[in-house]
Amino acid sequence: MKLLKSHPILSIANSFVIDSPSPSNLSYLWNYGSLLGLCLVMQIITGVTLAMHYCPSIDFAFLSVEHMLSEAEFIYNFIIYNFTVSCDGAADLPSIMQFDNLHITENLSQAVKTLKGTSGIYCITNQESGQMYIGSSANLGNRLTTHFVGGSSNAHLQFAIAKYGLALFVFSVIELCAKDQLLVREQHWLDWLFSKDSSLRYNFLPNASSSLGYRHSEESKALISAANTGSQHTEETRAKMSAANAGENHPNFGKTTSEETRALMGAAKAGNSNASKSVSIYTLDGSLVQSFPSASAAALFLGMTQVGVTCAIKRNSVVKRLYRVSFTLP
């Protein structure tokens, strides 16, 4: 003890740590304040570092975020820390980009164009109920179309869209990441979502891109079957589907086919004997609806392409949720 008080350096440490006068109401609870202060300092440091790599320009903002995720060392960890520390609820979910009023065709088309070819994690939020759906995609533009136009995604979400209307739903990009990191990052956010009350989520499964461990009940199967039987796209939905895939959003926009490729396609089509085979259309219980002299005639009846009809025959898949098609036996 004498050394602590007599040594020139140790005496300073002793006066601040051991013999430092302090009020009686000072307890270990004060440590929480210092820990929160440490979190604040780390938030400031990571935020400033991210701001140094971000370009606030309408032309380069998106590219600068992709650069941070794929090329800048340690920046990816900074982004995750900056998001994770501040995320405490649905309203506090990080949002790199947000798209609303998607019931308006122009807004939907612009959103698809903006997100085309971008990979990342997204969240669809019901602004009235607060419920969320979190997923990932290698092409967020296509996934947005699947959810809001195609109507073939999560059944819970689709029922909610039908109930509340598309105007109440917001599509947010939570995080941009490389394709090989999608499942890892989606699992991170699903863990966060499933830590909340079950009434706040549309997701059925706690595992990223897996149906492992979940089975629909017989009652649910009956409800899904009844909801989909005889359903058809409305004219408004068809218009939105057309707008979402028009112009630059079309997968073949700007592409040209070489003469050699055209010749190969012509030769393959000429040698395809399926085009001249008669086709029969049946209901799901096996009753004959109508027979046609060719796949193209059946396609015209079903409102599909000839290729679509041929693929449905080969895969023995259900068409329009109502029919099965097959080549007519001689």
Image (tube, grey):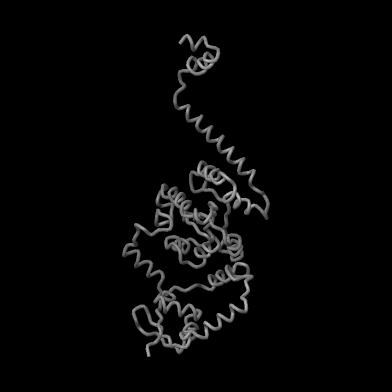
Location of residue 70 with respect to 320 vertically, above or below = above
Q: Position of residue 134 (x, y in %)?
A: 47, 55
Q: Does 329 sit left or right of 254 as displayed? A: left
Residue 282, picture quadrant: bottom left
Which is more toward the observer, 316 or 303? 316
Which is more toward the observer, 266 or 224? 266
Q: Quadrant of the N terminus?
A: top left
Location of residue 100 with respect to 298 vertically, above or below = above
Task: Tell me which residue sits at (56%, 34%) in the image.
Answer: 41
Task: Tell me which residue sits at (38%, 59%) in the image.
Answer: 211
Q: Position of residue 42 (x, y in %)?
A: 55, 36
Q: Does 303 sit left or right of 60 as displayed? A: left
Residue 104, picture quadrant: bottom right
Q: Position of residue 49 (x, y in %)?
A: 61, 41
Give the residue furthest to the front. Answer: 260
Q: Position of residue 301 (x, y in %)?
A: 48, 83
Location of residue 231 with respect to 177 vertically, above or below = below
Q: Does 53 sit left or right of 85 as displayed? A: right
Task: Tell me which residue sits at (52%, 9%) in the image.
Answer: 6
Task: Tell me which residue sits at (32%, 64%) in the image.
Answer: 219
